[in-house]
Each structure stands twice: as C-alpha cells, then as structure tokens.
Amino acid sequence: MTTIRIAERERTPVRGWLAVLAVALGIFSLMTSELLPVGLLTPVGAALRVSEGAAGLMVTVPGLVAAFSAPLITVLTGRVDRRLMLIALIALMGAANLASSMATSFAVVLLARFLIGIAVGGFWSIAGGIALRLVPEHQVGRATAVIFGGVETASVFGVPTGTFIGDLGGWRAAFAVVGLLGLFSVVAMAFLLPRLPAEHSFTFADLPKVFRGNAALRSALALTFLVITGHFLAYTFVRPILLDHGVGDSTIGPLLLVFGIAGITGNFAAGGLVSKSLRRTATAIAAALTLAMLTLAVADHTTITAAAALIVWGLGYGAVPVTFQTWIMRAAPDTTEAASSLFVSTFNISIALGALCGGVIVNALPITGVLWIGAGLILLALPIIHRSRL
C-alpha cells in the first residue's frame, strides 16, 4: 500500500500540490464557518433575542457534534473514496451557512450549526493526514503546514472579514458569504483532488484499542484537551472582553485581523520547528497562550496593548494545529486515520466545553474570569509535554 501511495504522488507532483491547495481552501472555508460566530455573538444575540452566553452555543454546538461525528463518519464511510467524502462534507457546510443567513429564530441557527459540526468532524478526521497521499514524502511536513495554514488564514481573512461584512451588511450577509465560499471550495476540490480510495477500514471496537495501546497518543490527546479547552474558554468571548476593557467596537475587526496574521506566522514557523523539537514547540505554545491571557486579564488596555497581547496569542495558537497533528502522526504512524479521528473528537469536545464553560463563567463572574481559568488549564499541560518522549 505504501508503494502505491508513493507511486501515485510521484506520478503527478504538480497536481498533488494543487490538491493540497484545494484541501487548504476547504479547511479555510470550514474553519471560517466554525469560528465566524466569535465575531458576531453580539449582533446575532441582539437580533434573535438571546444573551451573549446563550449565543456562545453557536460555537459549542458544532464543536460537540464534530466530536462525535469524527469517528462515526470515519468508521461508517471507511470504504468510500475520501475525495467524495471531502466534497460532500464541504457542500453540507456551505448549505448550512446559507440556511443560517435566512434563519428567523435562534433554533434554526443552532440546527444549521449542528450540520456544520458534522462537516467539521468528518472533514478534519479525513484531511488531517491526507498530505501523505498527495505529495512526496519529503514534502509532507510543508504540505501539512499549508493545509493547516487554512485554519490560521480563516482567522486572518475569514473571521475578521466576516465580522466586517456583518458590521456593514448585517450578520446574515456574513453567513451567506461563507456559505457561497463553501460551494466554491466544492468546485475546486471536485476539479483538483485525485481519486483517494480508502486505504484502511476499521470498526468502533478498534478505536479503544488504538487509544489503550499507545501512550504517546494518550499524551497528545490530553494535551489537546487542556490547551484547546483553555483557548476557547477565553477566545470565544474575546469581543465582549475587549469591549469591556474599553476597546472601541470599530477596532474589533482589525484586532482580530492582527490575531490572524500572527496565527499564520505561528503556523508556518511551527511547520519548521516541529521537525527539530516537537516538545519545545509545544512548550512555547503553552507559554505564549498563558502570557497573552494573563496580560489581557491584568493590563490597562489601549488598542496597542490589546494588539500586543493578541499577537502573542495568535503566534501561540497558530502553531497548535500543525504541532498537535504532527504529534498524532508520530504517535500513530500505522493508524493515522483512526488516531486523527480521536484527535478531532478531542479537539472539538474541547471547543464545545470551552465555549460552554465560558458562557457559564461570563454569566456568573466578571468577564476576565475566562482569561484566568483558561490560562490555568493551559498551564496544566506543561507536565504532560515534559513527560513526553517525542
């Protein structure tokens, strides 16, 4: 099977990189869709008459659904061509966003977010290790960084642009644009992705075996849980946090743009660093996220100080996807798709739990509470990192 994969990659190297870019575009549209509510909590909540804490469910619901859909879709579609699956899942995401743009009640929005969760879980579990099948082996690290660069590019152009569109034309317009972007991604993948026949099939019974038999994988999943829960507990409410600290509403979009640019920088920096020292890269991520959150919690804020904290935060979080996915691939080189489905489940449970707990904290405590608790969770990841052998 490995021989076949290498032969396929060497036969069409240019098409392989075009396929990588198509998958990156799909990840970009998907993550823009998942994170878009972060910049629109206030207007959506006001329009549909729900609190900001309740509006945070727009992040919680897809995260929770994705956590269950990742292994479910991976198992049930184990024999289906991965190209067809990626196209179908992005099409579902696009349609759900168009439905959100026409919703007249918060319940309809949550239903659409449920469908987006299915797309997120399925797409990530399949696409996480797909670079192995698209480019020569010595280019896999760079290709993985490009694919996961779509996550950070979503933060740079997706979320801030969506926020800007929402400010100009209303939140419905923002959801509609993301829906159309998803449909464009479908066309790109349909033309550029090669056939990707399923290489391995596994059952639900295999998942606990992969988990129990691999200590490095368990460490990676524990690290993912702590860091992603801590991040989203605070980041989901970054707009109301900044507003509460006196930052002008009109500057929120540009500040999120600053965060995203730093995220892209962190992503591609990590793409080179993980090959040298995975453990040091993970330690730097935890340090950067903790420092940024504590700075926002205690500093007197101007636009400049807020931007500085968000740059550090963006650098740290930007390095997360490629670093953690690399950890997963090194921990489980022979069961990458199964391990990736567990990774995606953990990642999205953490998103959901972070957003949900953040909503409870925001409704019960001063809003800076999410920053303190988020930083505390990330600090708990440091012993796991330093005990690892990767």
Image (cartoon, rainbow, N blue to C red):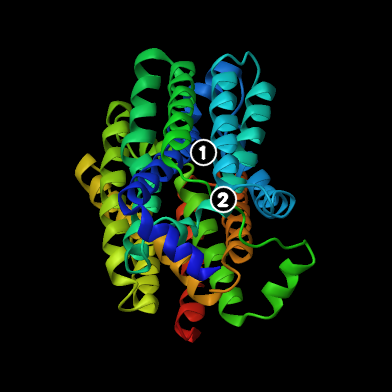
Image quarter where the N terminus lies is bottom right
Residue in the picture at 48% in, 31% down: 186
Please name the amino acid that badge 1 sits on. Answer: Glu
Residue 111 sits above or below residue 279 on the image? above
Residue 227 sits above or below residue 386 on the image? above
Q: Is residue 209 visible?
A: yes
Whole-percent x, y for residue 205 in the image: 80, 66
Callout 1: SS: helix
Whole-percent x, y for residue 185 in the image: 44, 32
Q: Quadrant of the rendered structure where residue 332 is?
A: bottom right
Image quarter where the C terminus lies is bottom left
- Residue identifier under label 2: 351
Whole-percent x, y for residue 323 in the image: 41, 66
How many labels, in total? Answer: 2
Residue 162 sits above or below residue 72 on the image? above
Please name the amino acid that badge 2 sits on. Answer: Ile
Q: Is residue 376 visible?
A: no
Given residues 61 and 362, the one toward you in this image is 61
Q: Residues within 10 Å of mark 1 (few under 14, many from 20)?
A: many
Callout 2: SS: helix
Q: Residues within 10 Å of mark 2 (few under 14, many from 20)?
A: many
Marks 2 and 1 in Cβ contact (< 8 Å) = yes
Given residues 23 and 181, the one toward you in this image is 23
Q: Distance between the residues labelled 2 and 1?
A: 10 Å
Whole-percent x, y for residue 101 in the image: 54, 18
Left or right of 301? Residue 172 is right
| Marks 2 and 1, the one that precedes in the sequence | 1
Q: Quadrant of the rendered structure where residue 246 is?
A: top left
- Residue identifier under label 1: 34
Given residues 22 and 259, the one toward you in this image is 22
